[in-house]
Amino acid sequence: MSKNKINESKDLMVEINLSEAPMFTFARTQKIHTVKSLMENKNTTNEAKEVLEDIYKTNELSKVDYRKWIDSKGMTRELIISSVRSLPDSYCMDVFLGLIRLMVNDNSPLCPDENGLYKLKSNKVEFTLNRLCEAMELKSGGNTYKKIKDALRRLKATDYYSLGKGSLYNKVKGTYETRSEKAVSLIDSYDTSEIVTSEDGDNKLFSGYVTFGDLIMNNLEAGFVRVVRNHQYFQLKTGITRGLYLYIESNRTSTDIYIKRSFDVLKNKIPIDFEYPSRLKSKLKKSLESMYELGIIKDWFYGDEILINGFKEQCIYIIFKGTRKELIQFLTKKEQNFKIDNRKKTNDNNIENIEIKFPEDINKELLNFGINEKKIIELINKHSKYELAEYILWMQDGISKGKVKDPASLFVFATTTVGENGRMVNVEKTHPHIIQFVKKYKEEVEGKKSIAENIIKKAYEKYIDNDLKLFEEEDEFAYVATRDSVLEDISNSQKNKIKSQRAMYNMATSQQEKLKLLAIIEKWERFTVEQYKSEIFLEEFVKRIKIYRGLMNYLEFRSSYIKKNK
């Protein structure tokens, strides 16, 4: 955001995680997930299952929500929301933003220092319910006070776990939170016991307080915020409209003509649950109309309804300047200019003089071809990055010669599997120099990576081995009991594990997938001979004692090792 003075009477300060991560639910009826059902869900990652297992041990009746998505950089983001009460809804979001507004008021005038940081007196804000109602632009009264107190209870009872590559950003550290053992909370503590409501509903002027969580507080001070007009926000009638509004405002700049977002992004970031695109459009209709009437947006249209440059995709275009017709003309002209520019480049250069560069950002290249995000995820899951790179370079060559009319459709067609290992287009026959280039690049990169990874793996093995020896010396009884328990559990499950992996191997469609499954099967089979020296035993044993001994998993150790040896 631009580091400007915050006007307490007009501005609403929104911490960006609140608009970029699905921290609140906007459904009228909450879809309740049990911890057990999510643990058994095949789409839940192992890391998420570990967190769910800990939640289950604490309170098996906890209400939970789990979301996983792949962002525009190809990173997997995961978020678990857990609460012993109902999960926080749009009203909880309004209460929380109202509390932030009160904090801004208490610290006014709020101006950034020379480093662009906002100095806040404390992470605690004191308030009366009447004052909080004013901040939320609500009429004060008994029913409203009751709803606010309930929202505070729900906010306090809720934990957020940022998993995968992280879904909650820490501006101070400059990284996403990825610690599965530590939950993030919006408020650490609160007290309304000093707020007294009389029989006639009047709020007595006794003060309550809320203490904000560390992540939120640090991000507010670091300026990881978006400032919106509070009156505009509170004019919007529904939670889903307010959520969409905050997401749009967090993603637009003053120079943007439009923003384009896939249906999948809206599903996971607002969030809006839907099974079919028609249902999503139905849910968004009134929200978009409200923002249009208030002048927040100029227009919108859906990418699967209008043909742009020869293809449709499941996305929405939200327009801030101009008309729908003007934007479609702009996008079409932009594509035509791109093709003309590439033809000129080709005429000016012989193919021998064109330098081939490995496409580092596969996701971005596929987006540039006009492939929708859902299809990109499918392609990335199905093919290695080197296979995709071969076809990207082949496609770029075709575009540079002006031979490609519809890059998205052609790319998907070209990579379609034929037979056991074939593709619809054989790049090796038409462009052998591309295959040779990618092969050489892979050998160089993988060679360096494999040497580095081997060093780290050996260091990790030594780290684990040293701790296991120490564990055996310090607490032999616990060590032996855990070891025997793990051996027994693996022995009991070995047969079924091998059987299920073989079934998956028989159903696998790609050679890459088959090799991966074969390695897992062999690992389980080696346990019969190697027992407590086997790889599968060590993995499970370390997993069991990880929290008890404070051990790092491999990814944590790897990150720590790289930092120390930079």
Image (cartoon, helix red, strand yellow):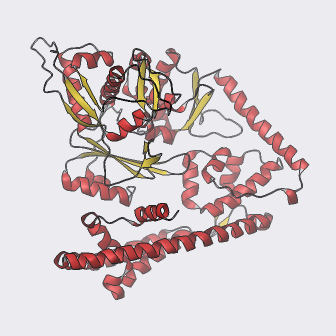
> Along the line of sight, which residue is nearer the eye, 7 or 248?
7
Where is residue 76 drawn, in percent x and y? 47, 52
Residue at point 63%, 45% (across, down) = 367
- From this viewpoint, which residue is outermost toward the left? 199
Residue at point 34%, 33% (across, down) = 27
Q: Is residue 50 visible?
A: yes
Where is residue 426 drawn, in percent x and y? 73, 64
* Quadrant in which residue 209 is drawn: top left
Horizontally, residue 193 falls left or right of residue 288, namely left
Q: Is residue 165 above or below residue 495?
A: above
Q: Is residue 560 above or below residue 501?
A: above
Horizontally, residue 381 falls left or right of residue 409, namely left
Horizontally, residue 435 falls left or right of residue 210, namely right
Q: In the rendered picture of this protein, how many numbered marks are placed on residues?
A: 0
* Quadrant in which residue 169 is drawn: top left
Where is residue 499 drawn, in percent x and y? 37, 76
> Along the line of sight, which residue is nearer the eye, 270 or 157?
157
Residue at point 17%, 17% (across, down) = 142
Q: Is residue 272 visible?
A: no
Residue at point 13%, 27% (across, down) = 193
* Quadrant in which residue 312 is drawn: top right
- From this viewpoint, which residue is outermost toward the bottom? 529
Q: Is residue 527 above or below residue 213?
A: below
